[in-house]
Image: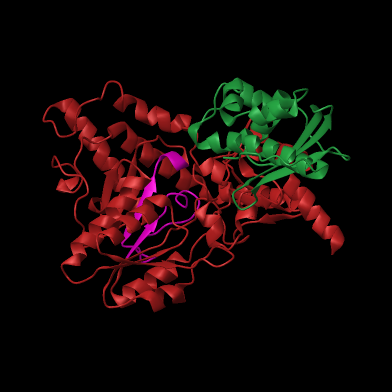
Chain colours: A red, B green
Amino acid sequence: MREIYADNSATTKLSSAVLEKMTPYLTECYGNPSSIYRIGGKAKEAVEAARENIAKNLGAERPGEIYFTSGGSESDNWAIRGVATALKKRGKNHIITSKFEHHAVLHTCEALEKEGFEVTYLDVYENGIVHPEDVENAIKDTTALVTIMYANNEIGTIQPIKEIGAICKSKGVLFHTDAVQAAGYVKINVVEQNIDLLSMTAHKIHGPKGCGLLYVRRGVPINNLIYGGAQEKGRRAGTENVAGIVGLDAALQIAVDTMDERCQKLTLLRDNLIDRLLKIERSRINGDRVHRLPNNVNMCFEGIEGESLLLKLDFNGISASSGSACTSGSLDPSHVLLAIGLPHEIAHGSMRLSFSEETTMEDIDYIAEVVPEVVQYLRNMSPLWEEIKKAEKEN
Amino acid sequence: MVYSEKVLDHFANPRNVGEIEDADGVGEVGNSKCGDIMKMYIKVDDNKISDVKFKTFGCGAAIATSSMATEMIKGKSVDDALQLTNKAVMEALDGLPPVKVHCSVLAEEAIKAAVSDYYEKRGIDKDIITK
């Protein structure tokens, strides 16, 4: 049976080239970068070389603006909480975000609300895109931070980051973006795109799990999240994940080097599959078709539930994900699908496929063959589908 | 989240899927907003459930519990079918993840709803205790 890993937005396979770069820092060069002796010094050199190269790849002016973290969630928590609490004493207690951010952002904002901060959650409309003018209209004297994701993790929609950043800049408000899904698929330049803080992680771009970064433009006031040793200029304590940092740098470098060709190929595969799956009756594509990550397909099929769809796909060798309640562990389906206005019963029947450079046209052909069969099979045993068809006949 | 082998088996090869056209009782529970609907059809001869079929919209556990529940009441007396608890269905499936317990409750309720419909159609005045 064909095995297709189509959940690259969840995590990716570690690239062998990345592993090769990491291995020495897990084996012979295991020293603590804070130590004085040579194997410590070598580790320190590796961390600083990675910082410098990553700064260059993100368009940052100074390597010192890159802070290594444990991943996207920590970076998001730190950016939002760190800036909000630092600006509170200047009378700024308002944060602007959107309704369909990652939970690392939303739950941090909700926690801050309980601590007395005010949060505005912007609409993302039917196509899953924040309107820059909504950001402009929401900014007030007390606004400390705007945090809008670069690309959505479920429906892959790419946000007008540069425009939002420009508005924030002109209003003197700090701007953070969670670029966990966008990095490696979209050209990022923090200076040109008016970004003050940016989160990213290694494991979404064929790097290792457990290592990410937060870009903090020089001069941005930010309190610590993690206290302890003097690592990262005293801003983020904890012995550096040296191999992880080397892996993050290597993965980002490969992603940047291969971006144009890879994204072009992925876009063709994506659009081909979307066109074929839209032939299934009562199916829909979620999120804007154009302003969309090149590796993301997110669709709903009426009358069926997402988790049973995933299990059937898994039996057929396809690894996918869904925004159904049953896969989220809560009673509600994905907040992203609800934010773009889908009713619960349709949101329950969602499927996300996310590809990588390893995905081939043969894989797409196979998926285009299996998905309609599985959808039909589940619809045949669905009383909801029966109702939908009955209502169709009556009209 | 990991399902037991039995849950996966009943999901992959569900028993008694379908409808009974001249059913003696039909029960439907759940709603589309929550993502689970179970519809159960029973045929009753001599106070015995001679046939049972189901249709389910829902997750893997919802389909597996429907399948197992129909197997457990097929050939049983109506009274015995009413005794079937969600706990018994779960045990027969070698357990369910905690977030899926409600699926087994739906299966129990679907049977009770089908029997209740059967009583009503036959003019039998009996109360069915549901959870």
The magenta region covers A175-204
Residue in the foreground of this view, choosing between A209 and B23 = B23
Residue occupying the point 51% across, 66% down: A124
Q: Is residue A149 magenta?
A: no
Magenta stretch: dominant secondary structure: loop
Give the residue at x 31% y 51%.
A77
Q: Can see residue A329?
A: yes
Q: Is residue B107 above or below residue A56?
A: above
| Up/down of A272 relative to A190, above or below | above
Instruction: Indicate the quadrant containing the N terminus of chain A: top left, top right, bottom left or bottom right.
Output: top right
Q: Position of residue A220 (x, y in %)?
A: 22, 62
A184 in magenta: yes
Q: Nearer the viewer, residue A393 or A86?
A: A393
Q: Position of residue A51 (x, y in %)?
A: 28, 45
Left or right? Give the position of B82 relative to A133: right
Q: Residue at x 63, y 21 (%)?
A: B6
Can residue A5 be seen in the rendering of this structure? no
Q: Quadrant of the C terminus of chain A?
A: bottom right
Q: Position of residue B111 (x, y in %)?
A: 69, 36
Give the side of residue A252 with respect to residue A117, left or right.
right
